[in-house]
Image (spheres, helix red, strand yellow):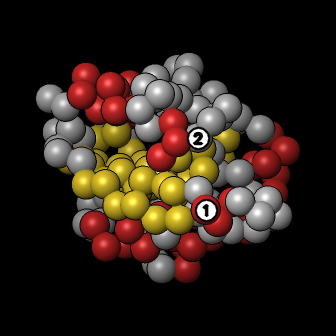
Amino acid sequence: KICSFFNKHARNTDTPILDVGAGTGLVGECLNKTGNKKIIGIDISPEMLEQAKLKGCYSSLVSANVTKKIPLKNNSVGAVVSAGTFTHGHVGPDAFDELLRITKPGGLFVLSINSKIFIKGGFQEKFSRIKNSISVPIFNEFKAHGNNKDENFSKIKIFASIFRKK
């Protein structure tokens, strides 16, 4: 889903793409198959990045915590995508500040956010605080999908949050 939302809203200037919480590389692989070649994968887990590397779809991989200073230059990425990272127990809205710092003006964000934590996890408040730094977000709701064996997984509602840095 995140890949299709990205492809729907992307411009040719939205490069390189930063895949936040790259994990095993599923989003990067999808983006690569649709013609996106400059993709940077970032994940806190070196083990996950080793799995992502095997996909052969990333131009570079970075092991870092996105809630701390990301080792990328200001205004250096054209787009930020993330699927399954902004959820309970993973990454919260404070990462947005650092992601905005490294994204070029006009850069595209396509992020999945678990609807259960959108308000209580502080995402709604964060969008309110950064509203002068971003375009008005578009929120698309969809059900989670993937290879999760939890029978309730497909009942989880996700917001695809789409916006641009001003």
Where 162 falls versus 77 (above or below)?
A: below
- Helix, strand or loop at mark 1: helix
Locate the C terminus and report the quarter of the image it occupies: top left
Q: Nearer the viewer, residue 161 or 19?
A: 161
- Residue at 30% of width from left, 66% of height from top? 10
Label 1 – label 2 distance at C-alpha: 15 Å
Q: Position of residue 32 (x, y in %)?
A: 54, 72
Which residue is drawn at the image coordinates 31% and 73% (left, top)? Answer: 8
| Residue at image coords 27%, 60% | 13
**Residue 142 image offset from top left, x and y in percent:** 46, 65
The answer to whether 116 is drawn above or below residue 9 in the figure is above
Q: Position of residue 82 (x, y in %)?
A: 52, 51
Counting other residues with Cα less than 10 Å from the Cα at mark 1, is it few (<14), some (14-19), or many (20 or more)? Answer: few
Q: Which residue is mark 2?
A: 87
Residue 30: x %, y % from top left: 57, 73
> Residue type at mark 1?
Lys
Q: Residue 123, can we see it?
A: yes
Which quarter of the picture shows residue 63? Answer: top right
Q: Earlier in the sequence, mark 1 or mark 2?
A: 2
The amino acid marked with disc number 2 is Thr
Q: Which residue is mark 1?
A: 155
